[in-house]
Amino acid sequence: MVSATEPHATALPEPVLTGSIATVRNSTRTPKIILAIIAAFSLIGIAFAFWLSVIPAGHPDPRLTYNVFYVLFARNEAAGLAVVALFSSATIWWISHKRTKAALAEVMPWLVGREKWCLAIGVLSVFVIATLGNQIVFHNYALTGDEYLADFQARIFLKGRIQAQVPAAWLDAIRVIKPMYVEYFPSTHTWTSSYLPVYAAMRAVFQSIELEALLNPFLAAVTVLALYGVARNIWPASKTNALIAIALLSSSSQFLLMSMTAYSMPAHLALNTIWLCLYSRPDRRRFYLAPFVGVLALGLHQPFFHAFFSAPFLLRLPLQRRWRATLVFAVVYGMACLGWLYWWLHFRSPVHAGGMLSVFRLFSPRVPIIQSMNLWLVLGWSSLATPLLVLLGFKQFLEMRPILQDALISCALTFGFYFFVSLDQAHGWGYRYFHGVIVCFILVAIVGFNRLSILVGSGRAQTLVLAGIAASLLIQFPLRCLQAERFVRPYARTAALLHAMSSDIVALDARDAWYSADLIRNDPFLEQRPMIVSLLGLTPPAIAVLEKAGSARFITRDDLTRLGMFTTLRNDYARDPFQLGRGR
C-alpha cells in the first residue's frame, strides 16, 4: 500500500493546469518571449567570447597557468552559442506562423508504439557513440590530471593496496616525478590519489580486463536506461514523456562528450539517476536501496555532487512525515558520511585539505564572471530544445508534484553552491560541475514540454522538440566533437611520443608549453619506463637520482612546438583586467 503522504507514487496523475486549454493553446507569447531571451543571452555570450579572445586570459600563454577555462570559452563558445541563437530565432519564426504544419507530429505516435525498441536503440547508440568518441575525438587519452588520477589509483587497487610505496631510490626526486594531484606522505614514503576511491575502484574493475575506456560509455548507457525508469515512474501514463526525456539526454553534447572522457562525472550522473529511479517508487521495496547507492555516490571522487543533488529529496521525507524512510536514510547516510570523512582525513594531507577550504569565499569578484560563463555553458551544451523547456518548466514550479519541485531545487542548489567557490572548473566539456544533476534538468524540461503542448498544441510541441533533437545531433554535436578533438590532439600526440621513447628518463620544462605539467605521469610503483620528469623544481639531490637512473632525453621548447603544443608567448601578457588565470 502507498500512503497518502507519499505523493511520488505512480498512481497520482499530473496536476491539471488552470485556465481554458482552448484559450491557452492560442497563446504563443510566453514561449516566444523565452526564446527571445535565450537568443539575446546567447548573443551576449558570443560577445563575451570575442572579448576573451583579445585579452591574454583567452590565450594559451605558458606563463598563464590556470586559464584553460577562459581559453576554451574563447575558442569554442562563440560558435556553440551562435547555434543556440539561430535555433531560438528560427523557432520564434516557426511558432509565429500558425499555418505551418507540425511536420514531425506523426512520428511520435509511431515511436511510442515501439518504445522498447526506441529505448534499446537509444542505449546502444549512446554506448557506441561514446566508445567511438573516446578513440576518435579524445584519442583514448586522459587529458587532465583529474582524469589520469583515477587510473593511477586503479593501478594501486589492482595490486591489492590503497597506497603505493615509493622506492627508496626515488625519494629525493619525488617532487619532479609526482603526477598532478597525487598525495605524497613523507612519513611513510607512500602516495595515493587525493580523491575518494569509488570511481577509481570502478576503473580498476575495467582496467583488470584492459577495457577501462569502456567504463564511461557503459555508465552513459546505464544512465539512459535509468532515466527512462525515472520518467515512467513519475509519468506512468505517458510513454511520450519517457521517450522525450531520453532523447533530450542522448542528444545533449555535454552528456555525449563527457561520456567519452575519463572524468568521474558520468559516474556521478549514472549513480544519481539510478538513485532517483529507486527513490521515485516509494511503494516498492527497492526504494530502500537508494541510500546504499548514495553511499557509493558520495565516495565517487568528491562528496559535494551527490550531496547537493540528493538534499531536497532527503529533506522531503521528514516534511511528509515518512518516519521509517527518514530513519533508514538518516542512518545509512550518517554512517557513509563518517566513513568517507575518515577516508578523506586519513588519505589526504593536511596541507591539501587546508588548501581546499581556502577556495570557499562569501564573495569573490571573479564569481559573477565565472557563474555567467557556467550558465552560458549549460545553455550552449544542452540539447537545443532543452533551455526553452526548462524555463517553461521553471514557471510551473508551484503546480509541480513534490518530486519535480525537488528536482528543480536540486539543480538550483548545485549551480548556486559555486557562487561560494572562487575557482572555475578549468577543463571541461560543457559545465561539468553541473553534470550530476542533468537528470533533474531533464525532468524539469519534461514539465516544460507538457506546458508547451498546452500552449501550442501537442503536435507542434512534438515537432519543435524533435527538430531540436535532430539539429543537436546533426549540427551541434559534430561541432563540439571537432572543437574537443582539435584541443586534445597535441596533448595526446605528445604524451604518446614521450611514453614511446626508449630512454630511461624523459625530461621537460613545464614552463615551455601551456599546461604541459599534465604530461608528468608515471606508474605508481615506478616500474615502467621511461620516467617522465619535470625540470621545474629540480634540485641537486634530484639530479643525483636521475643521473643514476640511466639514459636521458631532454624535450625542448622547439620539440613541443613541432608536436603542436602551445608555446607562444604573447607581448600583451600583463594586460589582463581581471587577472584571470593568474593562480588560484
Image (cartoon, helix red, strand yellow):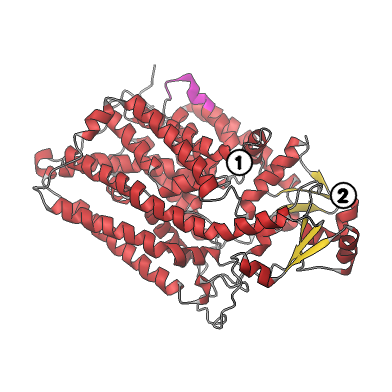
Residues tagged 2 and 1 counted as in contact (Cβ below 8 A): no
Q: Nearer the viewer, residue 488 or 229?
A: 488
Query: Do we see residue 512 in this rendering?
Result: no
Compared with 129, 278 (above or below) is above
Query: In the rendering, which numbered label is found on residue 300?
Result: 1
Which residue is depicted at the point 68% across and 43% down?
341
Residue 554: x and y in percent read 77, 66
Which residue is depicted at the point 20% across and 52% down?
30
- Under circle 1, the secondary element is loop
Q: Nearer the viewer, residue 310 or 487?
A: 487
393 vs 577, left or right, is left
Q: Quadrant of residue 249?
A: top left
Query: Which of the two discs, 2 and 1, sits closer to the camera?
Result: 2
User: How many residues crowd mark 2 within 10 Å: few (<14), some (14–19), many (20+)?
Assistant: few
Q: Quadrant of residue 561?
A: bottom right
110 vs 305, left or right, is left
Which residue, as the protein is rendered here, is positioned at the far top? 1
Q: Nearer the viewer, residue 114 or 186?
A: 114
Which is nearer the N-term, disc 2 or disc 1?
2
Residue 496: x and y in percent read 66, 54
Q: How many marks?
A: 2
Which residue is depicted at the point 32% across and 27% down?
115
Query: In whole angstroms, how far apart are the C-alphas of marks 2 and 1?
Result: 29 Å
Residue 144: x and y in percent read 61, 55
Prevalent SS, magenta region: helix
Compared with 388, 424 (above or below) is below
The range drawn in magenta is 282-289
Which residue type carries mark 2?
Pro
What quarter of the picture does the C terminus occupy? bottom right
161 vs 140, left or right, is right
- Under circle 2, the secondary element is loop
Q: Which residue is mark 2?
A: 167
